[in-house]
Image (cartoon, helix red, strand yellow):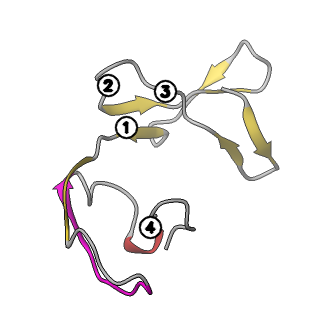
C-alpha cells in the first residue's frame, strides 16, 4: 500500500482489505526502495470483526440526548474508550 505521509520518525499507511474471512494478525513489512522489505517482531497489525446485534432504545426525542446501548461481539477488542465513537446518520461522530 502507498504511504500517505512520512517523516524521520513515522509513516502513515492505510491497511488493505484482507482476504475474505481473514481475522487475525498480519506482519507489517516496509520498503524504502520497492525491493528490500524489512519488518520487526513488534510490527503486527490485528484485523478484527465487529458483530453488532442490537440497539436499545430504538428511538428517542428529536432534540437528542438519549443514551443508547449497542450490544454485540468484539466491541472491546481494540482501541480505547477515547477513540471509540458513535455516528448517527450523517451527523459527525461523537
Contact flag, marks 3 and 1 (Cβ < 8 Å):
no
Image mark for residue 22: 2
Can you tell which of label 4 and label 2 is closer to the viewer?
Answer: 4
Contact between marks 1 and 2 (CB within 8 A): the answer is yes
Q: Earlier in the sequence, mark 4 or mark 1?
A: 1
Location of residue 7 with respect to 80 vertically, above or below: above
Disc 4 + disc 2, Cβ < 8 Å: no
Q: Secondary structure at mark 2?
A: loop
Distance between the alpha carbons at the discs numbered 3 and 2: 9 Å
Write down the residue under mark 1. Answer: 47
Q: CA distance from mark 3 to mark 1?
A: 10 Å
Q: Quadrant of residue 39?
A: top right
The picture places residue 23, in percent across and down from the top left corner, at: 29, 31
Residue picked out by circle 4: 85
Mark 2 packing: few (<14 Cα in 10 Å), some, or many (20+)?
few
Q: Earlier in the sequence, mark 3 or mark 1?
A: 3
Residue tagged 3: 17
| Real-space Cα separation, disc 4 to disc 1, in angstroms | 18 Å
**Which element is circle 4 on?**
loop
CA gap between label 3 and label 4 equals 22 Å
Which residues lie in the magenta part? 63-73
Amino acid at each position: 500500500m502507498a504511504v500517505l505521509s512520512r517523516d524521520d520518525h513515522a509513516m502513515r499507511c492505510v491497511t488493505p482489505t484482507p482476504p475474505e474471512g481473514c481475522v487475525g494478525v498480519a506482519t507489517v513489512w516496509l520498503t524504502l526502495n520497492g525491493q528490500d522489505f524489512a519488518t520487526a517482531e513488534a510490527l503486527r497489525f490485528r484485523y478484527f470483526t465487529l458483530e453488532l446485534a442490537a440497539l436499545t432504545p430504538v428511538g428517542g426525542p428529536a432534540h437528542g440526548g438519549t443514551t443508547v446501548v449497542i450490544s454485540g461481539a468484539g466491541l472491546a477488542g481494540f482501541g480505547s474508550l477515547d477513540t471509540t465513537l458513535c455516528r448517527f446518520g450523517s451527523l459527525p461522530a461523537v
